[in-house]
Amino acid sequence: MTEQPAPAPAPRREQARLWLIDHLPAGLLWHPAEWFLALLCALSGVLSLFTPVETRSLEALLPHPFLRVWGVLLVVGAIALASGLASIRHLEQDRYVVTRVPAYRLGLRLLGLSTTVYIGAIILYAGWAGLAASIIPAAFVAMCGVRLLTLGGRQ
């Protein structure tokens, strides 16, 4: 019986990749774009609460207290979405489970709603020129809607 030679050690880059896969939260591995968008929404919400508003369309259309509510919706929605994403647990090779589905849904709804308000403000403020500026936020709202559809109904 001949001995098989030991397999060559994986290159450092591959070792680092495998280590990251084993140690990063499952939600970050499965939904990195949603984490990124939650972070952006949280940052935008915090900035709107603690600094002068940079969005002239919202400033022109919403009274000051409503701007604060809009900022709170962004922050609470981002925290709820992050809570749902953080609850994702790996089951097997290509399957996972979300254990905080209500938080996940709440985050998607609040972020979709606050972004819809933003889109409306852009279009009302800029008219037809606002349509082009609202394409990316509208895609975000569509992503929230599609994700809500995939999460299914209340169970």
Image (cartoon, rainbow, N blue to C red):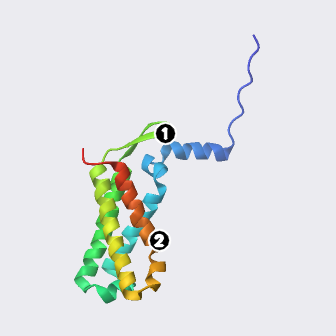
Farthest-out residue, top: 1
Residue furthest to the front:
128
Q: Residue 38: name its quadrant.
A: bottom left
> Residue visible at 32% across and 75% down?
117
Q: Quadrant of the N terminus?
A: top right
Q: Which quadrant of the figure has residue 45?
A: bottom left
At label 2, the amino acid type is: Ile
Residue at (34, 83) in percent of width and height: 58
- Residue 53 visible in image: no
Within-10-Å neighbours for mark 2: few <14, some 14–19, many 20+:
few
On the rendered image, what quadrant is the C terminus found in?
A: top left
Position above or below: 136 against 52: above
State how far apart marks 1 and 2 are (Cα): 29 Å
Nearer to us in this view, 149 or 88: 149
Q: Quadrant of residue 134?
A: bottom left
- Which residue position is annotated with label 1? 94
User: Any mark on residue 136, and which?
Assistant: 2
| Picture coordinates of residue 119, whole percent (x, y) | 38, 76
Give x and y (percent) for residue 30: 47, 49
Q: Is residue 62 above or below residue 81?
A: below
Residue at image location 33% in from the left, 87% down from the top: 59
Q: Amino acid at mark 1?
A: Asp
Q: Is residue 79 left or right of residue 133?
A: left
Mark 1 or 2, which is nearer the eye?
A: 2
